[in-house]
Amino acid sequence: MPAVRTVEATMLGKLDWSAIPLDQPIPLIAGAVVLVAILGVLTWVVVKGHLSYLWNEWITSVDHKRIGVMYVLLASVMLLRGGSDAIMMRIQQAVAYQSQGYLPPEHYNQIFSAHGTIMIFFVAMPFVIGLMNLIVPLQLGVRDVAFPTLNSVGFWLTASGALLVNISLVVGEFARTGWLAFPPLSELSYSPGVGVDYYAWSLQISGIGTLVAGINLVTTVLKLRTKGMNYLRMPMFCWTTLASNLLIVAAFPILTATLAMLLLDRYLGFHFFTNEAGGNVMMFMNLIWAWGHPEVYILVLPAFGIFSEVVSTFSGKALFGYRSMVLATMAICVISFMVWLHHFFTMGAGPNVNAIFGIASMIIAVPTGVKIYNWLFTMYGGRIRFATPMLWAVGFMVTFIIGGLTGVLLAVPPADFILHNSMFLVAHFHNVIIGGVLFGAFAGFEYWFPKAFGFRLNERWGRAAFWFTFLGFFITFMPLYIVGMLGMTRRMQHYDVAAWRPWMIVAAVGVAVLTIGVICQIVQLVVSIRNREALRDRTGDPWDGRSLEWATSSPPPVFNFAFNPDVRGEDAYWHMKARAKQQSPERDGPEYQDIEMPRNSPTGFVCAFFATIMGFALIWHIWWMVIVGGLGAWATFVVFAWRDHDEYVIPAEEVAVIDRVNLEQRRGLISMAEVG
Amino acid sequence: MSITATAGHAHTDPHQIGVLIEHPGPAPKRIVTAYGFWIFLLSDIVMFSCFFAAHAVLAGQTAGGPRGSEIFEPSYVAIETVCLLLSSFTCGMASIAADVRNRLWFHVSMAITCALGLVFLVLEFREFADLIARGYGPSRSAFLTSFFSLVGCHGLHVSAGLLWLLTMMAQVFAKGFRADILRRMTCFALFWHALDIVWVAVFSVVYLLGSAP
């Protein structure tokens, strides 16, 4: 009998039937719904014969536009998952007054941990990285990112991490430690289950993907710009992309190292963060926040870039104070590394250290304030069109200022001693992340959707989505500020204070309004796809845009531009349009040339497949499978490195056919404008 | 023509004062690849610096176990250092051989680099095995935890480098000096030299500073 057990332990590690939570209906039902949805989509794909299209055009694609779209799709799906967690938490706190509510503590703790992890790593990150991938090469006037195949690897590794988090729903458990897994709670002695391992390995895998994306985009912005695209002519979104990805490159290795240390503690009995043998718990806090604070700016800087584009386009004016905006962006990029200690003023580092970090935290509000004024002055005197992206931008300015002000309040150490880990803090960071990052992501989604797919989104449903989300946000989170002041701490599974109760009920109502907003967004997508012929944009420039992504057709051809654009100043496309209106119709029959493009490759998908296997095996201690996964990933890269042709040629005639259609539509647009 | 266009343009762009240098367009692939790899190396060095920071915090936490001066073998470390520095030289020779398309010298230099790397790894492995056998494994104290992690992290990088080195040799053997293979060779050389720099820091911070009684 012991021999049998040993064989099983060798083959399956810690995995057995007790890993499936048969006694808990909620995760099982949720898991079953997800499984049915995935199988349904797969069956539909196979039955309809779309499998080869899906494989050839999307899964193996190294086209930055396709990869960008897949990132955003992943983020949107995970937003539904993270949102469900949020709804469950709000309902729990609304009903758990002097009672246990409907979620037992161990389940509730998993939900708030999963909510934070998913929203940051698998919603906010892929959403902004997806938009950067989609738009930045177009704005720079180039044909692709610096490393197209690695780009695909990065996306699929992110998806692999997301998959592992979702597997934890039905096989085993997720961490109960909060979204940053602070030791000593996350150490083996206090969290003996596989929850923290799921958390750590999924973040390690997706973290590699993020690092790859960061290196790729930094290199793209710094080394691949079209002729004449000097640094100070780049659109604002390219600048914020540069800043954000520099932060990724500098900060994500810290996360990797920190989680590696935690894993060494858990797997091999090391003593980095244990209470015994000289380990240092506060070292974890310092390391994780040295990543965690820049991470906040990794997320919000691209959103600032999106708002800059949107505000300038829909005000019909060049961005006010472009250079001060560049300076503010780079200042935030640097200062964001000097404020991490404000996450644990209560550590007791002493008044001088706390004062320095408190002042640094307040200083970072200055460049952010510069940005707000620049957007306001861009709108001042402009001809403002309140299309959906602009609504999100204006809603952002109102919301984000409130979040920023409560942030400055929390940066005062004595105030922080009272508000630390209270619901006030929860309200603050949701105020900046929803009001900043999520509104920015939605603005970018509405603004660039026509570029990605060639038709606009329905404005009525878009407006409804905005207003429900905007109001829902305030109804949900303003009460949290109040209960925070009334002394409620975060992450409470139940409570006995009568004064908190009404506010928790209001917050639950707010989350219902937010949910209507999300439903409106889904309806908007469905309605727009159905009416896509009516919403079709043939000009490639539906918003009267200013930067180069609008200079090509929608969706752009695989090579983006038939000729590398020649840039002569800021707002490159705006000036091209102005010149085209002055001059007689451009020279006929430009000389088209063959274009070389990178070939598609399944490397990313196969590599992520092996990474998922390896991650799962590491979580459950199935050592032979770890080796198989590792060897598989390495072999994938060797096979990739061995291929003889990594590019294919699009002949000049084909380029000509595609480009002439685009030019024809564009001429129509310009002559229309002349008549008008 | 382009000069006049530039000069004429300088007047229309209020932000440009004086001479305007037009960005020439996307860089060639060789530059882009090496540049991207430099950025990766910088990120890798950030990761190492976390382990260095952890070592700085934990080096004094011996929890009743041995201190650095009691367990370090200077002769071991000296040989390891010499091996790694020499391997950087032979790696440089391999780069030159690749530049002049000399297959024989490329393979010879790479083989020597590989052998030196292996000697380094064997010595490091013996040092670790010896410490563990004496009961001074990484779970003995926080100091040994950070020591094993920092030095082991470098060792893992060297192991990965050797795997990459052998793959490079196989590629050149099978495919010759193709443009993409030469780009990879540039990256490999950068990686190998960077590991040398990290080792210099490990040698100074862990072994030299740690040997002080």
Image (tube, helix red, strand yellow):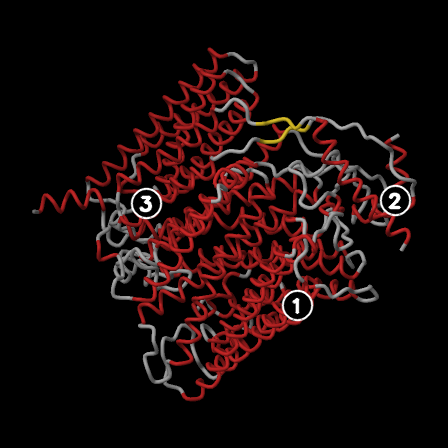
Circle on res. A463:
1
| Amino acid under disc 2 | Arg
Q: What residue lies at 56% left-to-right and 62% top-to-bottom?
A: A522
Frontmost residue, A659 versus A178? A659
**Circles 1 and 3: CB distance less than 8 Å?**
no
Q: Nearer the viewer, mark 2 or mark 3?
A: 2
C-alpha gap between disc 2 and disc 3: 76 Å
Is any atom of residue A332 visible in this view? no
| Amino acid under disc 1 | Arg
A427 relative to A672, above or below: below
Q: What residue lies at 58% left-to-right and 74% top-to-bottom?
A: A406
The quadrant the C terminus of chain B occupies is top left
x, y (%) of residue A505?
A: 47, 82
Q: Identify the secondary structure beneath mark 1.
A: helix
With A241 as the anchor, is B24 left or right in this view?
A: right
A170 relative to B107, above or below: below
Residue for badge 2: A579
